[in-house]
Amino acid sequence: MSVTKAVVLAGGLGKRLKPLTDNTPKPLIEVAGKPIIVHQMNWLKRFGIEEFIVTIGHLKERFMEVLGSGKRYGVHVSYVVEEEPLGTAGGLNNAEPLLDREEAFYVVNGDVITDIDLRGLSDGLEEGFIGVLALVPLPSPYGVVVSSNEGVIKRFDEKPLLREHWINAGVYLFKPKIFDHLPERGDLERAVFPRLAKMGKLRAVKYPNSEIWKSIDTWKDLEEAEEMLKRLNFLKPGDHPLEKTFKPYAGDRQGKG
């Protein structure tokens, strides 16, 4: 399957990052010296994505000022403008004329920084399914204390990944049939995914070992993302997770029908 287009859902208000988002849309906030959306472009380009469709609303002019046509980043950028907030599903629905002839296309939440290997998603989009969702382990918001049955403390794990629980990574691969299920207003997570799951039309690919994944919703998330990327900058060439080959593990796909 050849996928060359990606949608970045960037129309949100970013209320929890005020006052920073009063003048800067959340996807344009800099992390480790680059806007979030530029990190996303660099990552997606590794998998052959040449054209980006950005759904914008809040401070839409700023996107055009920073990204322009995309030429400076080696890609082509188109914009779909929301005159009022439509939610992630409504914003994606507006992009249908630019995507309805594609075999498939990626969709990424505009506040996610990640390194996941997209080949896992394309392998999972089989006949009978409309979309594939990337899943990552739930990051614990707290440090965890590990003790023995006798109550002896063995160690302290600082905010470990809870690998028995999985969350939506905000990265998707859809067929154009998704547009048959999108409302004019609403969110993918609440208005679309639960219904498609009941229909058996969604699959999941788990990424248990991704070294880079962060959804940036709060000031604390922003600080942690900055620390995460700065730490990885010290890795030697070839050791960076973005340069590693994706190796599916047994049971990494779900939703087989």
Image (tube, rainbow, N blue to C red):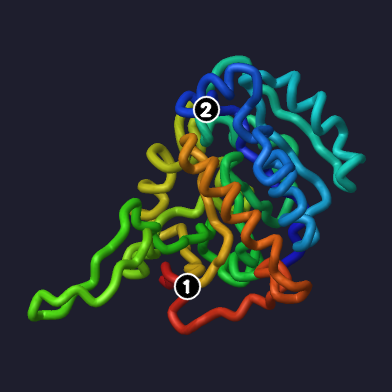
Q: Secondary structure at mark 2?
A: loop
In front of the other: 250 or 165: 165
Q: CA distance from mark 1 to mark 2?
A: 32 Å
* Left or right of 15 in this view: 92: right
**Which residue is under mark 1?**
253
Residue 243 vs 130, above or below: the answer is below
Q: Secondary structure at mark 1?
A: strand
* Left or right of 115 in this view: 202: left
**Given the image, on which type of amino acid does mark 2 rest?**
Gly
Q: Residue at (24%, 77%) from the top-left corner? A: 154
Q: Residue 84 at what x, y percent from top left?
A: 57, 16
In front of the other: 136 or 103: 136
Q: Residue at (10%, 75%) from the top-left corner? A: 151
**Given the image, on which type of amino acid does mark 1 rest?**
Arg
Residue 55 vs 139, above or below: the answer is above
In what quadrant of the picture does the N terminus appear? bottom right
Residue 194 vs 35, above or below: the answer is below
The picture quadrant where one finds residue 257 is bottom left
* Left or right of 144 in this view: 95: right
Which numbered mark, 1 or 2, is in the foreground of this view?
2
**Which residue is under mark 2?**
14
In front of the other: 238 or 13: 238
Q: Residue at (58%, 55%) from the top-left corner? A: 228
